[in-house]
Image (spheres, rainbow, N blue to C red):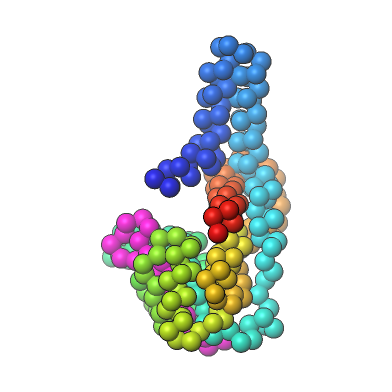
Amino acid sequence: MNTLIGTLFLPPTSLILLCCIGFFLYRRWPRFGMSVSAIALLVLLIISTSAGALLFVAPLENQTPVLNATSIRGAQAIVVLGGGRLQNAPEYGGVDSPSYWTLARLRYAARLHRETGLPVLVAGGKPDGGNESEAVVMARSLREDFATPVKWLEETSNNSAQNAAFSQGILARENVGKILLVTDAIHMPRAKMIFQQSGLEVVAAPTIFFSHDKFSISDFVPSGEGLRRSYYALHEWIGIAWYKLRY
């Protein structure tokens, strides 16, 4: 239900619905109805470009600097958040495989593990109803693809708030209070806020910075990638606002 409601409020569904409302209003108020539809289509056009997506992406990514050696001091563990999976991957014998979002997070976590030697916790349950948790998929990928061991698996969470609460419970039993948190730069402001609320001392270790891409002419042309980035960033802005209002 929450996913359905979120889809209705986020583009492109929300803007398509607004455009339809404009056409409906056109019968009674032609100028107003046409204006509503035109504005909806114009906004959809803008946010479907990678350049337009930066209006929402860059302010999120700029909140978190790249990890530096000084801030790592005192950290006791690396926590990697799941970002989805590809189910029944045929090239891997039908087992689930990390999505490319998750894979990028795992790659960076593996690098941090090599540099620091810190133990790794992977977090992710079955929000998509998979046969195995995202944590299991992530741990398998770290072990087989990056030769990186995983010490803890948090397998029961279905959202970021549960990621934080359940991970904190696991780490508290190991007397771990300060962590390196690995997730996308877009997701990091909300994730860091939630993990800090759980009682952990958080050092942000963001990866995947879209706002650092070099510009090209194609960035001003509507694309699925541009719309996806806008959707993701708007989802995070709404999530931040909702979390602040609720907690």
Q: Quadrant of the N terminus?
A: top left
Q: Quadrant of the C terminus?
A: bottom right
Q: Residue at x 28, y 62 (%)?
A: 131
Q: Residue at x 69, y 83 (%)?
A: 70
Q: Is residue 177 above or below residue 20?
A: below
Q: Quadrant of residue 128?
A: bottom left
Q: Residue at x 42, y 78 (%)?
A: 170
Percent across and percent down for residue 208 are 59, 63
Q: Main secondary structure of the magenta part?
A: loop
Q: Is residue 127 magenta?
A: yes
Q: Is residue 225 magenta?
A: no
155 sits to left or right of 45: left
Q: Quadrant of residue 125?
A: bottom left
Percent across and percent down for residue 187 are 57, 60
**Magenta region, residue range:** 115-135
Q: Is residue 182 above or below residue 24?
A: below
Percent across and percent down for residue 66 are 67, 71
Q: Is residue 15 visible?
A: yes
